Image (cartoon, rainbow, N blue to C red):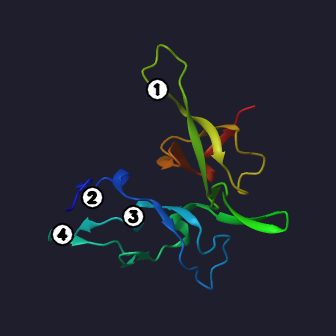
Amino acid sequence: KELILNTEIFNHQYISREAIVKYIPLVTDTEIQSGDEVIVHHNVFRRWHNMRGIEKNSKSYIDENTYAIKEDQIFAYKRNILKNTNTCGGGILTHVEDEWKSTPGHCFVKPIKSNNKFNIEKERPLIGIMKYTNKDLPGINNGDLVGFTPSSEYEFIIDGERLYRVLTNSISIKYE
């Protein structure tokens, strides 16, 4: 039997945006490695209808489990590490999840709740807590309160937490 949970292919929010890296091109200079978990642009896995109504795969599609992704379509990565903990001469492999890291040009900001009783907005606009920063933002660390420019946020759910992907050049202020 088959269960279809999503029949809407047009809404980007219903498209998977997580992947596991199989291979890295030899000509690419990146910190991302094979086996890393990545957060990617929704168009990587998106299906669409052409002008004749025929359903098509994205340009990234190679086969059912393989997609060619450009580096600028990857927003964050996480490396799952196996550590060898040595106890009494015997080694035990422990699975450790590394923290998400943003790729150059991107960061992730957690929205904060509004405390204004007279505003219908549930969140404070254009302000949030930096969740995953990168070296493009010197002086801004994870946990800092930051502001960003209008229409620069793009919503993701990462590890069950709602975050905004914001371009690093759209971070406008660090609040003290």
The secondary element bearing badge 2 is classed as loop
Task: Answer few, some or many: residues within 10 Å of disc 3's Cα (few below 14, many 20 plus, some between 14 and 19).
Answer: some
Amino acid type, residue under disc 2 in the picture: Ile
The secondary element bearing badge 4 is classed as loop
State which mark lies toward you, 2 or 4: 2
Residue assigned mark 1: 122
Task: Answer few, some or many: residues within 10 Å of disc 1's Cα (few below 14, many 20 plus, some between 14 and 19).
Answer: few
The secondary element bearing badge 3 is classed as helix
Rendered position, 123 above or below 53 = above
Residue assigned mark 4: 51
Mark pair 3, 1: CA separation: 29 Å
Q: Quadrant of the C terminus?
A: top right
Instruction: Identify the residue shown where x is 63% and y is 38%.
Output: 129
Mark pair 2, 1: CA separation: 28 Å
Q: Quadrant of residue 134?
A: bottom right
Residue assigned mark 3: 43
Amino acid type, residue under disc 1 in the picture: Lys
State which mark lies toward you, 1 or 4: 1
Circle on res. 9: 2
Mark pair 3, 4: CA separation: 18 Å
* Camera-nearest residue between 110 and 1: 1
Mark pair 1, 4: CA separation: 40 Å
Instruction: Identify the residue shown where x is 45% and y is 59%.
Output: 17
Rendered position, 105 above or below 53 = above
Task: Answer few, some or many: residues within 10 Å of disc 4's Cα (few below 14, many 20 plus, some between 14 and 19).
Answer: few
